[in-house]
Image (cartoon, helix red, strand yellow):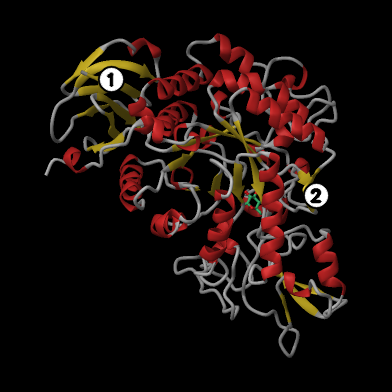
Amino acid sequence: MNLEQTLREPIAPTKYLWWQHGVIYQIYPRSFQDSNGDGVGDLKGIVSRLDYLKWLGIDCIWLSPIFSSPMADFGYDISDYCGVHPLFGTMADFDELLEETHSRGMKVLLDLVPNHTSNQHPWFLESRSSRNNPKRDWYIWHDGGENGELPNNWLSVFGGHAWEWDETTGQYYYHAFLKEQPDLNWRNPDVQQAMLDVMRFWLDKGIDGFRVDVMWHMIKDSQLRDNPVAPDSPFHADDLIYDHYIPTYSTDQPEVHEIVRMMRALTDEYEERVLIGEIYLPIHKLVTYYGQGGSEAHLPFNFQLLTLPWDAARIASSIDEYEGALPMNGWPNWVLGNHDKPRIASRVGRSQAKVAAMMLLTLRGTPTIYYGDEIAMRDVPIPMDEIVDPQGLNMPELNVSRDPARTPMQWSNEIHSGFSQHKPWLRLPYNSGRVNVEMQKKDPHSMLAFYHKLIAARKQYAALNIGAYIPVYSDQQLISYIRQFGDERFLVILNLTHRPGYFRPRTGSYSGIVILCTEIERVGMSVSGIIAMGGDEGLLIKLN
Ligand code: GLC
C-alpha cells in the first residue's frame, strides 16, 4: 500500500496551538546576558535581548531555574520556589520580563523542579530537624541496616551513593542528584499539594507553562528494591557509577503517571498552557508520558537527536519509530541541545550542525533550540581549575563537566563578547570576537543566517510546520522525508556524512526547486531524478 494513503489528513492550521506550531528557545539565564556587570546573566539582560529572539523567529522562551537557591547545582537546588534569586534580579524584573515577552507575541516557560529541593529549603530543614516533625515524611528517609548499611544500592546521577546519613536523626535520606538536593516524597499528599500550589502561583502570574525537571524520577519503588547491574557495564562494585546500573526501581515507576496527570489537570485549568517533561527514556516508555487520552505531558521531551550516534540509518529508523509510537493526538517534538549535554556543533562538527539544524526545523513537531546553537557555539574548553559544575567536579576522570556547554552567549566582538562588562562566570572561547551574533548577522553564509531562514520557511509554509511526515527511503548516508499539507509538498534530503552521496529513492521520483540549502549557491536550482548530494549537505526542496 502507498504510505501516503495511510496518513491521517492534518486538520486546518488554525486548530493548532502555539506550542505545536511555534519554536521554543532555551535560555540558560546565567549565560545569556548580564545587565549589572557581575559576570552572571540576569532577567534584565534577557529583556534587552528579546528583540533579537523576535527577529530570529522564536515563539517561546524557556528559562532554566531563576529561583532562590544556594546554587549547589546552579539553580536546580531550589530553596524557595516562589522567589527570584537576587543574582537574576527581583520579582519586579520577572514581571517586566513576562510583560515584555508577551508584548512581543512570545511566550514564557519556567523550569519546575519538583523531584527535589535544596537541602536549605525550609521544608527540608524542618524535615531533618526531628523524626517527629510533621514534614519528616516529605522526604525519603530510611534506617540503615543492622551494621549501618545503606538502605539499597541506588547511586546518585552525579556519582557516589544516593543515600546520605543524617547524624541528628540517625537515618539516611535519598538524593538522586547531589546530597544538597534531597528527593521529595511524592507519595505524600501534602507534598503533592505544595508543589501544585507552586505551579498555581506562577500560572496565576501568567506564565505559559513549565518544563518539568526529571519528570521520570518523581516516584521511586515503594519497597526500595535494589537496581540491577547493567548487562554490558564495565562493572566494578566500588566504582559507584550511575550508568553501571539500570534504574529499574529508582525511576519511571507506574505511579509517576498519576502525579503527571495531577500536574496536567491543574495546567488545563488555565488557557493554552503547556506542560513539557524532561524524560530520558527509550521511545516506547517515553510516549507513555503523553498519558491515556492525552492526560499527561503535552510534550515529553524527545532527546533522540541528542543521544543517538550521528548515523543516518539509526536516526532515520528512530524518527520512524517515534512517529509510529506517538499516541493519537500526541504531538511530536525534537531537541538538539540543552544545558546538560555537549553542544551539537562539538558533537557532530560545525558542518554537520547545519544539517542537524535543518533536521530539527523540518521534522514534524515542536523544535527546541538551545541558546547559542543558532550561531554554532561549540563547547568551550574549561581548564581543570575553572570547572564549577558538580557533575564534572565529582567525576573528574570521566570528563563529564557540563560547563563547556553553558558558557556565555557570544554577542559581539566587544569586551567579553558583549555578554558582560565584567569577567564572566565561565570563560568565553578565544574566537568569540569572530564567532558571534553581530558578525553572523552580516554574513549570509553563517549559521545564524541559516537558522533565520529555516525558521522563516517553517512559518511561511504550513507543510513544514504542521504538515504530515512521510519517510522516503534512499541511501544509507542520507535521511530523507516529505512534509505535506494539502497540495503543498516539500522534500528534505540530509547527508549525515562528509562524503558526497546520491539521493536515489526506492520508489517514485521527485522534482522541484531548492528553496534552502546548507550552501546558499544551490538555492533556486531545479532538481529531479537521482540527486547528487554534497558532503554535509542538506536540501529543502519545494516539490512541483
Ligand atoms: C535535570 C537538569 C540538570 C540538573 C538535574 C538535577 O536533569 O536538567 O541540569 O542537574 O536535573 O536537578
- The C terminus is located in which quarter? top left
Kindly indicate the quadrant of the structure image that contains residue 305.
top left
Q: CA distance from mark 2 to mark 1?
A: 50 Å
Q: Amino acid at mark 2?
A: Ser
Q: Quadrant of residue 149?
A: bottom right
Is residue 506 in view? yes
Q: Write down the residue under mark 2.
A: 69
Q: Residue at coordinates 37% horizontally, 18% vertically from top-left?
A: 516
Q: Secondary structure at mark 2?
A: loop
Residue 41 shows in the view = no
Percent x, y for residue 23? 50, 31
Q: Position of residue 82 (x, y in %)?
A: 77, 48
In the rendered image, the quadrant that contains the N terminus is top left
Q: Earlier in the sequence, mark 2 or mark 1?
A: 2
Please state which of residues 3 and 149 is positioned toward the viewer in this rendering. 3
Q: Is residue 300 above or below residue 27?
A: below
- Check residue 542 in the rendering and tell me which mark sits there, or answer none: 1
**Label 1, residues with CA under 10 Å away: few <14, some 14-19, many ≥20:** many
On residue 346, which mark appears? Answer: none
Q: Position of residue 246 (x, y in %)?
A: 51, 67
